[in-house]
Image (cartoon, rainbow, N blue to C red):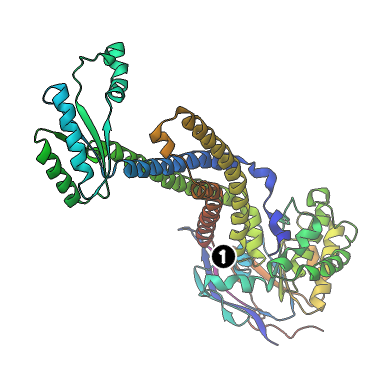
Amino acid sequence: MAASTARLLDNARDGRAMSYVIAIMLFLTVLSAAMGLATRNAAGALERAIAGRLTVQLTSGAPDARAALAARLAARLRATPGVTRVAPVSRAALADLLRPWLGAEANDADLPLPAMIDVDLADTAPATLARVTAAVRGVAPAARIDAHASWMASVAGMLSFATWLGLGLVALMATATATVVVVAARAGLDAHRATIEVMHMLGATDVQIARLFQRRIARDALVGGVAGGAAALATVALIGARASGLGSELLGGAGLGAGAWLMLALLPLVFALLAMLAARIAVTRALGRIL
Amino acid sequence: MANIVQFENVGLRYGTGQETLSDISFTLASGAFYFLTGASGAGKTSLLRLLYLAQRPSRGIIRLFGEDAVTMPRSRLPGFRRRIGVVFQDFRLIPHLSIADNIALPLRVAGVPEADVAGPVSEMLAWVGLGDRGGARPATLSGGEQQRVAIARAVIGRPEILVADEPTGNVDPEMAERLLLLFDSLNRLGTTVLVATHDLHLLNRVSEAQMMRLDRGRLQDPTGLLRNPPARRD
C-alpha cells in the first residue's frame, strides 16, 4: 500500500502518549549509556595511569641517613632495566599532602616523614616487578614497596561495576521500550479493530496492516526519542562541563570522545528501529490469531 | 456454466452452543443473481460470513472459485477476499477518510499504482451518483448515500462475487430500489450477486433472480434448484 493509506489509522484517537513515554525512556537510556561510557573511559584512564607505577617508602633511620639511602636507592633504580622514571618525592610535596590534616604543623622540620620515591615501570610483567623489588631490597632491605595497582584495584572494580550497571540499564530500558511498544500496538489494534476488519475483508494482508502500525509507532518513537535524547545529551554535556571544572584527574578521564557522543546520538534511531520491529511482531502475531 | 461457490453439508457452531447453520448445501452459478431471505436470526449473516471468508465452518465443505476454502491456508485468504466484494448493512466506511479514499481502498490494498486509482474512483462515484461528493467525509452523507459509497467500494476491484448483507436495511424504500438497480446493473456485467434481505418486496424487482431461504439455520430447497442452478441469464 502506498503512503496514501498512511491516514488509515485515525491520528486523533491515539494522542501522543507513546511519544512522551519514549522521550522519558530515551532520556534515561542516554544518561545510563553516558554513565557507562564515561566510567569505562575513567577506568581505562585510571588503568593507564596506575599500571606499572609503584612507590618505595623508607621509614627507618635518622632523617639524614634516610635521605642518603633514598639517594642511593634512586640511583640504583635508575640503573635498573625496565624502570622508565624515578622521581623522589620532595619533603615539600609530602608536607602539601599532609597539610589538610596537620595544618601548619605539616611544615615542621622535626616532623618525621618517610622518604618516598615514585617509580614508573616500562611494563607490568611480574619479571620486571621482581627485578625492581630485588634492586630495592639490595640497597634498602626494610623499604616498603607499594604497587599502585593493588590499592587502586577496588576503585577500578567499582568503575567496572558502574560501567556494567550503565550497560545493564540500557538493556533494561530497551526491554521496557519494546514492552511499551507491544502494549501500545495491541491497544492500537483494539482501537482500530473496525478499520482492520474492513481491511481484512478487502483483502489486506497481515503485513500490509502491520506496516500501518509499525510506521506510526516508528514515527512516534523517533519524535519522542529525538526529544528525550537531545535533552539527555544536553544534560550530559552540562555534567561534563561541570566535572571538568573540578579539575579531578579521575573525572577528567571520564570525558566522552567523539565516538561515544555519536553512539549516544544514534540511540534514538536505534530505539525507533527497535520500536518498529516490536510493533511489527506484536501486530502480525495478534492478527495471526484472527482469520 | 461454472459454479463459482459450492457449500456441501456445511455446519457452523459458535462455541459449544447449538449449530447456527446446519447441513447447508447449495451452489451459486457464475453470473447469476440470488436473494437470501429469512427471518432475523435465521443465520443469513453467518452464512454470508462463511462466504466472504470471515469465518471458517465447523464442518462441511466450501469450495470457492473451484478451491477448498475450508482447509485453505490463512496466507491465501487475502487473495481470495479480493475476488469477493462485500456490502455491509452498517456500511463500515472508514470515518476519517474521504469518500473517494474509502472507495479507492480495495485498489490500494491490491497494490494498484496511485496514478491508476483516480480514474476508476471517479467512475465509481459517478456510477453511484455521488460524482461531486468525493472529498466529503462519510458522516456528512445520508444513509442511502453511505450505502452507495459502500457498494462502490465493494465493486471497484471488479470482484467476481458481490455479497450484500441487508444493504437496504437502513434506507427508505425508494433508495432501496435504487440500490437494487445498481446490483442488477452490476450483475448484467457478469458479477455473481448474492443479496441477503428480509424485505420480501424487493424479491420481484430483479427478474430471474433466485431465492434462497434460511429457516432457523437450515436452507430450504424443496425443488433442488439450489444444488443444480439454472443457466445464467442474458
Q: Position of residue B2 (x, y in %)?
A: 68, 86
Classify mark 1: helix, strand or loop: loop
In the image, what residue occupies the spot 50% across and 32% down? A239
- Magenta-span inclusion, residue B84: no
Q: Position of residue A257 (x, y in %)?
A: 49, 46
**Chain holding disc 1:** B
In this rendering, the count of numbered labels is: 1
Q: Position of residue B167 (x, y in %)?
A: 75, 61
Main SS of the magenta part reads strand
Rendered-image quadrant of the C terminus of chain B: bottom right
Residue sitting farthest toward the top: A104
Rendering quarter of residue A109: top left
Q: From the viewer's perspective, is B162 left or right of A226?
A: right
In the image, what residue occupies the spot 77% across and 54% down? B170
Which residue is at the front of the view, A3 or A119? A119
Q: From the viewer's perspective, is A249 left or right of A276?
A: left
Q: Is residue A64 visible?
A: yes
Q: Which residues are magenta?
A: B20-26
Which residue is at the front of the view, A160 or A218? A160
For label 1, the residue is B55
The amino acid beneath tag 1 is Gln
